Image (cartoon, grey):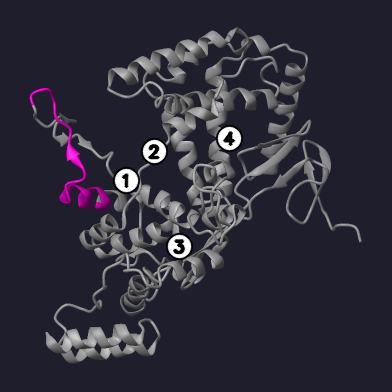
Amino acid sequence: MPEKTTKSIFKGREVRIKANGLPQGSGLFWLDSKRLYIYAKVQGERFSCGTNDWRVALDVIETQRAELEKREKGLVFADVRIGELLDDVVAHFEARGVMRGDYGTKTAYVARTTINMEGGVRDTFGKIKASKLVPADYTEYRLRWTANYVAKGKKADRVQNTIDHHLVHVRRAITLGIENRKVSKDTPLPKIDPKNSLAGAREGLITSDQAVALIETLPEWAAVAFAVCYSTSIRKKEATFIRRSETNLPMINLRASETKQGKARTHGVPDTVLPLVNLWEAKTKRDYPKAEFLLHRDGAQLTVKELTDAFEKACESLGWHVPVLDDKGLPIVYMGEKVKMDRSKIRWHDSRRSAITEVSSLLTLSSQEVQKGMGISHETQAKYSQNQNAPTLILAALNAKNAKAIDVVPAAPVAVHAGTDKRSKLTELKALFDDGLIDGDEYKESKKALLAA
């Protein structure tokens, strides 16, 4: 059955409009469900028209087609500068971020910040024509930045990974330019050595004692978030998107648009942390029943900055993040009043590395299962032992391993309103037990503590 269309007039000619609102045979198509942008294909290349008006999009297509025809004949290869290609790659990341939802917006931000850093790739390569690039340009850039980092006390072999993060944007900009027929296929690319990643990779882990100290020091909303990340390998930003509607404890589901890799994942919260999360959810049901997210602050979605600030404050109070001192032994102050801190000893993201290392030690799991269950690449997995697993199996294996071990998370106090009397606390405790949110032993211990108070 032929698709139903309606008639419309564009520039004096009749066009047939399909049910999705786009002209038939135009090469235009929607890529996201919200129809925020119209996407198109010209000579096999897909690009965003940056509009929701198909009339504007058709004009964009004609311009793009004419430009590609010029580039096919090599008429503008010599004129394209690296700065234009860098602009294109940032626009590419921004368009991809729209497709990936809220999580993806950071990619464009990081790319733009790295590209525009003082003395970075835009300052160095921006005005150079792509046709004039030579491999020696990249070598000179690497040597200059190596000297800059070494002068700051960093090791030459370990900073190569950081410099790769500069040059990878130039590489992506040029490859995108080749795909879009803006530059010649012979344009030299910067070399990115995989060995640099291994040499420059951070190796820090968070021990169980450190995790307990953090959970006891952090404010409750941040402590629960940290415990979830530490026990599941969920990233800090991913944790801010965990929806209660997607959660059936002990299992947590992450949407594809809200993970770093853009793929849906499922994680299981192990028994060492589950009581803390259950109590938090019980408090949410009572105090913020309309809260959309599992991890929140007074019912509102958490932000990465809130978690980072709370974590850094806790680490400072524990003596793990300390002021950087000058030659006279005095704290270095910058921006007029802010003390420069050394935060290298422990970072939030170390919790993910700790969880992956823990799971990788489970001999009952295959490497493919760990890669899928923890949301990591084959290359990342190669840094850890080769034994891994998928969500349910990972959870079962962790619980079996920790069955006779001391809990990572200390006994969580029953969350109650300040000022309530002992009777109301006991009533609330019984409700938690009746709802299955705490087991019999926890109920007895908590009741005993309340009666003794």
**Magenta residues?**
310-328
Locate residue 326: give its quadrant: top left
Report the Cα–Cα distance between label 4 and label 2. Answer: 29 Å
Q: Is residue 26 left or right of residue 170?
A: right
Which numbered disc, 4 or 2, marks the residue closer to the eye? 2
Report the Cα–Cα distance between label 3 and label 1. Answer: 21 Å
Report the Cα–Cα distance between label 4 and label 1. Answer: 30 Å
Q: Is residue 384 left or right of residue 5?
A: left
Report the Cα–Cα distance between label 2 and label 3. Answer: 26 Å
Mark 2 near mark 1, Cβ–Cβ under 8 Å? Answer: yes
Mark 3 near mark 1, Cβ–Cβ under 8 Å? Answer: no
Residue 322 part of the magenta-drawn span: yes
Q: Amino acid at mark 1?
A: Arg
- How far from the left and from the top, in percent, is residue 55? 70, 40
- Please determine whether, in this image, residue 159 is positioned above or below residue 359: above
- How far from the left and from the top, in percent, is residue 432? 33, 85
Residue where numbered disc 3 is placed: 242
Task: Looking at the image, tell me whether mark 4 or mark 3 is earlier in sequence order.
Answer: 4
Q: Residue at x 28, y 38 (%)?
A: 344
Q: Residues within 10 Å of mark 3 (few under 14, many from 20)?
A: many
Residue where numbered disc 4 is placed: 92
Which numbered disc, 4 or 1, marks the residue closer to the eye? 1
Which numbered disc, 2 or 1, marks the residue closer to the eye? 2
